[in-house]
Image (tube, coloured by chain):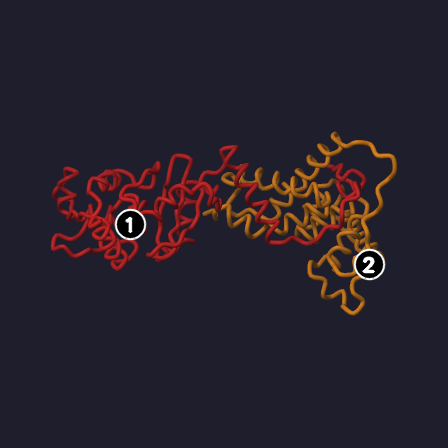
Amino acid sequence: MKEPFEQVVQQHGARVLRVCRAVVGPVDAEDAWSETFLSALSAYPQLPADANVEAWLVTIAHRKAVDVVRRAARQAVPVERLPERVAQQRADGRDLDLWAALAALPTKQRQVLAYHHLGGLPYAQVAALLGGTPEAARRAAADGVATLRRTYDPDPDRSPDTDPEGVLP
Amino acid sequence: MTSTVGYAESSWAQGAPPVPDVTPGELAALHSRLVERAGGEGLLDVAYRTLDSPLGALLVAATPVGVVRVAFAVQDHEQVLADLAARVSPRVLHAPGVLDVVAHELEEYFAGTRRTFDVALDLRLAQGFRREVVQHLTAVPYGRTASYAAMATEVGRPRAVRAVGTACALNPLPLLLPCHRVVRSDGTPGRYAGGERAKHTLLALERAGRAH
């Protein structure tokens, strides 16, 4: 028997929003989240009762993130100079620094980190989603984590073991 | 499927500020937006909300057809929602705005300023004889009572007194379809989904309401 969809939103809403933010950034993330849950609501009655709801949502979120970014790209207005990278001087917010460091990663690495570490998708499913082999996905994640360890400097008084999202394994 | 999502194309590239972590307020806003869009696209199969009442928290749920369920706290709201997901549709969302009218009418009823309800009902959770019985409940006027035996006669099956009792006990829309007005032949209130005490409270409320 399937639980009410409201439970799905309550249990997974925050996680899916983090994944969307890591992949498309803060502005487009809200659209990606909305499209993800609207699409999930539509398909929910047909979802097998034993399905992994979290993995299902992350898979939808990936597709919707692609759509949202494509749409944004079509509407984008060319600008004269490149925007500056996300500021990293915010010492008051550990999470802000983490997002900024994530934003600076190559797309594939960021996607693998988002889907595997934030979304909880196994590497085999990440590979199915993004193309390539599970081993390549694992390497991309390892490379991403190595870069994050260099670029992301959490509070030096705190051990990386306290990383709340498990982004730095 | 390969992806074209890239830093260079995403909103991060447009000089947006760094991403803070998810807050309850942000999720609430996204939830409201989801409810609105789901309604617009015909995907909100069951909307629900709760409201406070003199009988404790009430859960009210509606389909696009009308109000489909009213449940008391003693009936376990979680269980009631799971039942709606199984029997109506799992597309269930907390959507208080959709139920503003019925919530307001219930508040008026408990305040003693309303005697009948004026909202569309969806009777899909009561079928066959049970449906026939609960549809007859509004024939018992505000502030009056009828016996289970009289109701059985009313629906043309005078010997089905026990079945009438069961139909009332399983009424999916208590209050809106006033099963609390059906009492034992000796005049005592009898069973009620919200508890015998709740039934007593409602009958007293309506007696006071009639006195005005």
Disc 1 to disc 2, C-alpha distance: 66 Å
Residue B122 showing in the rendered view: no
Nearest the eye: B156 or B195: B195
Task: Farthest residue to the bottom: give it.
Answer: A157
Percent position of residue B114, x then y: 29, 44
Pointer 2 residue: A149
Percent position of residue A147, x then y: 83, 54
Task: Farthest residue to the right: give it.
Answer: A81
Query: Which label number is shown at residue B112?
Result: 1
Percent position of residue B56, x then y: 36, 57
Say which amino acid is labelled 2: Arg
Q: Residue B212 vs residue A140: left or right?
A: left
- SS for tag 2? helix
Chain B color in figure: red
Query: Which label number is shown at residue B126?
Result: none
Chain A color in figure: orange
Percent position of residue A140, x then y: 79, 49
Nearest the eye: A50 or A144: A144
Residue B44 showing in the rendered view: yes
